[in-house]
Image (tube, rainbow, N blue to C red):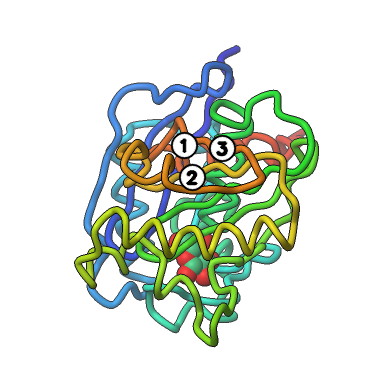
Amino acid sequence: MTKKAIGIDIGGTGIKGALVDLRSGEIIGKRLRYETPAGGHPADVAAVVAQIVKELKVNVRQVPVGICFPAVVRHGITLSAANVSQDWIGFDAEGLFSKTLGRTVHVINDADAAGVAEIKFGAGKGKSGVVIMTTLGTGIGTAIFNDGILLPNAELGHLEIDGVDYETKASFAAKERENLSWTQWAARLQVYYSTLDKLFSPDLIIIGGGVSKQHEEFIPLLDLNADVQPALKRNNAGILGAASLAWKYRPEPKLTK
Ligand code: BGC
């Protein structure tokens, strides 16, 4: 039997989804993307998720569905909301998506999902010790692993350095907003990553997010104790990780008489 699951990656600007082959870590067929509805309210986001699942033409009764989201997610409840509506704070996201899709879904933090994808299929594959995954996008997402095991909801993008929430200075959005050159941005990344280095002594730091395809512009400018590698799954990492965890935590089939 092919091990497959649907992965959906909800972000502040786009919602992406695809069916994933979990043995190879590759997307099967097409990857769909829609804009996140203005305001990012739960009902509107759920409608886009339902549209994506419909277009994938997969029987959701037989294929697990995993969804990742830019928030702390504990037991399916979103406890924060970055770049989406504040309605998600303290909200039963797993309940909403399960009801909308007519099957149990698994919801997790977006950076945790991206990290799981890199550990299973990408730059962290086969790496033991402490690995920190970071995604540089609208915010900074982080995920911590020890010997491949995830410590969920790390939220280290919000580390306060020099009195500021540092994702506001070092995310890719900050680079764009302030028109920073690669060198100027790398100087901020150096401050951020050397703080991670000092606090956690990781063996490996993986840098993901869309900008990681231009890794040659900034990774060589960083001087850290940890090994630093660009993510390999880039913009598909959230989809792959969400699908992978949905498979792992898929509900047991119900017994019928
Ligand atoms: C959020 C995280 C999220 C990250 C990347 C941060 O602002 O607090 O939950 O993982 O952005 O989207």
Quickly name the residue at label 3: 64
Q: CA distance from mark 3 to mark 1?
A: 29 Å
Looking at the picture, tell me which residue is in the foreground, 224 or 22. Answer: 224
Query: What element does badge 1 sit on?
Result: strand
Quickly name the residue at label 2: 207
Residue 99 placed where, x, y %?
51, 60
Residue 226 placed where, x, y %?
65, 43
Quickly name the residue at label 1: 230
The amino acid type of the residue labelled 1 equals: Pro
Q: Residues within 10 Å of mark 1 (few under 14, many from 20)?
A: many
Q: CA distance from mark 2 to mark 1?
A: 5 Å
Quarter in which the C terminus is drawn: top right
Residue 100 placed where, x, y %?
44, 58
Residue at figure coordinates x 32%, y 69% from the top left: 174
Q: Which of pointers 3 and 1 lies earlier in the amino acid sequence?
A: 3
Q: CA distance from mark 2 to mark 3?
A: 28 Å
Q: Is residue 199 left or right of residue 73?
A: right
Residue at figure coordinates x 47%, y 36% from the top left: 231
Q: Is residue 252 visible?
A: yes
Query: What element does badge 3 sit on?
Result: loop
- Do the residues bearing badges 2 and 1 touch, measured as CB atoms within 8 Å? yes
In the image, farthest residue toward the top: 1
Quarter assignment of residue 42 = bottom left
The amino acid type of the residue labelled 2 equals: Ile
Quarter in which the N terminus is drawn: top right
